Image (cartoon, helix red, strand yellow):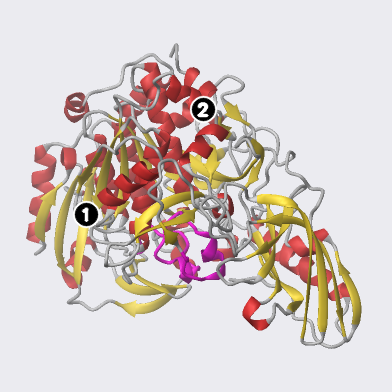
């Protein structure tokens, strides 16, 4: 669902524009007040909003993952509570296997059932956590008493069952859930077809539905290509054409689109050294705290066939030490592929490069899932978690919470609990669609970031000053209002200006419909699990540089990118450094974040953003002269008390926009914890030193 301002024809008035802004705001407010619907016949609530296209072919091949229940899960829960309070030690793989993992006898019984149903058992998972099997849709439906149908949701087709799996009484107590019945994989930007292949990342060009125009990668050490300055002084721009003249005044965002010299290319983008300076990480490296001795795991689907080379070049060109990278699984995608899953190659690239940018001394373990189905991704998490030395696992992907059911959450939570019991933090990005109302038509949050056994990492917009220190931060929520068309057309004014709410994306957050409030969030509003827990750089318009292989000839390119997919690997790298400082595992990060001393996390309130200089304009046409104030040009505001707007000349389309920051749908930003930024952003040195005496 795309919301735009009303078209303005003859006789339109200034009041019409005001009504348009009010209608948009009302739509967003109504969506924000809604909750996810109740499950339909035991299935995921999202199916209530999808179109049923009818039964799948009985001969269609289906692979299922039957997740087994843990032994003594209540005992594991008690152990986790004791660990969080410092009253119990973390467990080894052998201890977890002996005390809580499903047994070989459980596996044998479930396997025998599957074979008796005519299915082929194809494998047993790490620690006996699951059994994989395959067969025709007809045999799967018979085995689990489900009806597999094809569905369409906002143009995306997938397979699912509106009925939960049913098992015979002698097998059911051993099974937690059956994965693979649904093919709606981990891609939360469901309604944004231009981002269908991406996960939790965005590039500035994505806001216009255009392919990025990367520039050749520089090989100079510690050298950036894109401008490290995103915001400039005030400017005035005038446009004319088609009998209309318009003028706008206010802040300027983005470097000149004609710039070609390294360090000046439009619009802007930060290199590692700039982020390291801005977030007070440099003193850590000077003290020898860079993640050395730890292993950071990354889980992605499909992977990138060129990741080893891309990461090696990124490290060399950005003045970082070589990457110590181990890959488990087979990468199958590339950044230049036309395959629908090619976005995962970009995801893999930025994940590896930005874990390394933050924790350059850490080993990186990249575990590739063969598909983006939850079952395969959580199987990859289980593999990463069981690998010796892993202290944290970064996951820049997810589904909306309404695409999950109780059984599937129980299975995935079991994997997370076991990782927590080992002393590991499993971190997830919270998504790039704000409260999801624009995409879904109802409010939702991202999952698995909302699990109480995960750490939810959200996103911010950040502006740096000339010394690469933070000038201001606010919540990531970027509206775009087009005010002039392409330069090739003479830059004629858009009359009236065309608004795209959240056109530049927004950090996910909000209130869970599935989980009660964990003990470590008590004192925050309500009685449900809240996210995010913490945030970091995510706005693609104040994003970071990454290097990738851009064509089949092997040419290297550099681009800018953002999304909570950047924030999550960055935070996971920092958690590795904190673990190095503590000299022992720290467990799930989320509970510890709410106990840190003042100064370890910088509260993001939005109040420091400069509201002076926001854009105003005047349009003169056959109907007369009308003035557009700063609020109308930034609409919809969704009740945000402060925001920053600026004039922006896109280097991709060459159009002119008013770009507005700090407008994250209905998610408020303010003092203390908030639904847009959580507790805030880490202050590198103080954050890590808080664990010195842990």
Q: Earlier in the sequence, mark 1 or mark 2?
A: 1
Residue 684, numbered circle: 2
Q: Residues within 10 Å of mark 1 (few under 14, many from 20)?
A: many
Q: Which mark is in front, 1 or 2?
A: 2
Asked whether disc 1 touches disc 2, contact meaning CB atoms under 8 Å apart, the reply is no
Residue 132 lies in magenta, yes or no?
no
Visible residue check, residue 406: no
Viewer-proximal residue among 672 and 163: 672
Q: Position of residue 285 (x, y in %)?
A: 43, 25
Element on which disc 2 rests: helix
Q: Residue at x 89, y 84 (%)?
A: 623
Q: Residue at x 32, y 62 (%)?
A: 555
Residue at point 9%, 64% (across, down): 118
201 within the magenta span: yes
Give the percent coordinates (x, y) of residue 384. Answer: 25, 39
From the image, tell me which residue sits under label 1.
65
Q: Quadrant of residue 160?
A: bottom left
Q: Position of residue 647 (x, y in %)?
A: 72, 61
Q: Which residues are magenta?
A: 184-213
Q: Which disc number belongs to residue 235?
A: none
Examine the rendered structure and indicate whether residue 33 appears above or below residue 517: below
- Looking at the rendering, which quadrant does residue 306 occupy? bottom left
On screen, residue 308 versus residue 666, left or right, reads left
**Left or right: 256 in relation to 122:** right
How would you classify the magenta stretch by its main secondary structure?
A: loop
What residue occupies the far top of the structure in this picture?
693
Quadrant including the N terminus: bottom right
């Amino acid at each position: 669902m795309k919301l735009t301002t009303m078209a303005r024809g003859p006789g339109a008035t200034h009041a019409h524009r005001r009504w348009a802004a009010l209608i948009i705001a009302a739509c967003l407010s109504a969506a924000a007040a809604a909750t996810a619907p109740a499950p339909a016949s035991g299935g995921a609530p999202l199916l209530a909003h999808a179109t049923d296209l009818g039964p799948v072919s009985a001969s269609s091949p289906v692979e299922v993952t039957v997740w087994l229940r843990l032994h003594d899960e209540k005992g594991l829960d008690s152990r986790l509570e004791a660990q969080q309070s410092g009253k119990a030690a973390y467990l080894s793989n052998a201890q977890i296997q002996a005390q809580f993992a499903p047994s070989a006898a459980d596996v044998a019984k479930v396997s025998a059932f599957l074979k008796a149903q005519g299915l082929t058992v194809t494998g047993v998972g790490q620690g006996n956590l699951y059994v994989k099997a395959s067969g025709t849709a007809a045999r799967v439906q018979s085995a689990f008493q489900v009806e597999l149908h094809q569905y369409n949701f906002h143009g995306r087709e997938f397979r699912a069952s509106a009925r939960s799996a049913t098992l015979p009484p002698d097998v059911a107590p051993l099974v937690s859930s059956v994965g693979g019945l649904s093919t709606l994989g981990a891609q939360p930007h469901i309604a944004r077809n231009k981002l269908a292949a991406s996960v939790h990342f965005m590039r500035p060009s994505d806001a216009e539905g255009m392919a990025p125009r990367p520039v050749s990668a520089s090989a100079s050490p510690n050298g950036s290509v894109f401008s490290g300055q995103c915001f400039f002084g005030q400017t005035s721009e005038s446009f004319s054409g088609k009998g209309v003249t318009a003028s706008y005044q206010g802040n300027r965002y983005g470097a000149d689109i004609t710039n070609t010299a390294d360090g000046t290319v439009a619009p802007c983008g930060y290199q590692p050294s700039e982020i390291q300076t801005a977030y007070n990480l440099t003193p850590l490296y000077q003290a020898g705290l860079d993640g050395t001795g730890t292993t950071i795991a990354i889980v992605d689907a499909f992977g990138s066939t060129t990741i080893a080379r891309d990461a090696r070049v990124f490290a060399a060109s950005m003045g970082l030490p070589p990457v110590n990278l181990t890959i488990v699984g087979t990468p199958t995608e590339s950044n230049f592929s036309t395959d629908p899953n090619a976005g995962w190659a970009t995801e893999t690239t930025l994940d590896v490069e930005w874990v390394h940018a933050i924790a350059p001394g850490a080993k990186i373990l990249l575990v590739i899932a063969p598909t983006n189905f939850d079952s395969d991704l959580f199987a990859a998490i289980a593999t990463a978690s069981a690998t010796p030395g892993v202290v944290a696992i970064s996951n820049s992907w997810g589904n909306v919470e309404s695409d999950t059911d109780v059984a599937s959450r129980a299975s995935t939570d079991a994997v997370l609990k076991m990782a927590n019991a080992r002393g590991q933090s499993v971190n997830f990005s919270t998504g790039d669609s704000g409260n999801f109302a624009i995409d879904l038509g109802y409010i939702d949050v991202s999952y698995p970031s909302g699990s109480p056994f995960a750490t939810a990492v959200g996103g911010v917009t950040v502006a740096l000053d000339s010394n690469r220190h933070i000038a201001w931060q606010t919540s990531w929520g970027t509206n775009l209002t087009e005010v002039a068309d392409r330069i090739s057309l003479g830059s004629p004014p858009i009359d009236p200006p065309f608004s795209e709410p959240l056109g530049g994306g927004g950090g996910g957050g909000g209130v869970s419909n599935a989980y009660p409030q964990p003990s470590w969030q008590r004192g925050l509003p309500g009685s449900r699990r809240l996210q995010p827990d913490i945030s970091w750089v995510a706005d693609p318009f104040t994003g970071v540089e990454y290097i990738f292989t851009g064509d089949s000839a092997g040419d290297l390119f550099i681009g800018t990118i953002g999304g909570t997919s950047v924030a999550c690997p960055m935070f996971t790298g920092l958690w590795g450094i904190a673990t190095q400082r503590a000299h022992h595992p720290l467990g799930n990060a989320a509970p510890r974040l709410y106990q840190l001393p003042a100064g370890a996390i910088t509260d993001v309130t939005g109040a420091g953003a400069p509201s002076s200089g926001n854009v105003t304009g005047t349009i003169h046409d056959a109907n007369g002269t009308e003035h557009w104030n700063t609020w109308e040009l930034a609409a919809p505001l969704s009740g945000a008390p402060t925001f920053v707007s600026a004039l922006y000349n896109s280097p991709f389309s060459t159009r002119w926009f008013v770009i507005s920051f700090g407008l994250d749908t209905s998610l408020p930003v303010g003092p203390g914890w908030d639904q847009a930024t959580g507790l805030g952003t880490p202050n590198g040195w103080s954050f890590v030193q808080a664990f010195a005496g842990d």
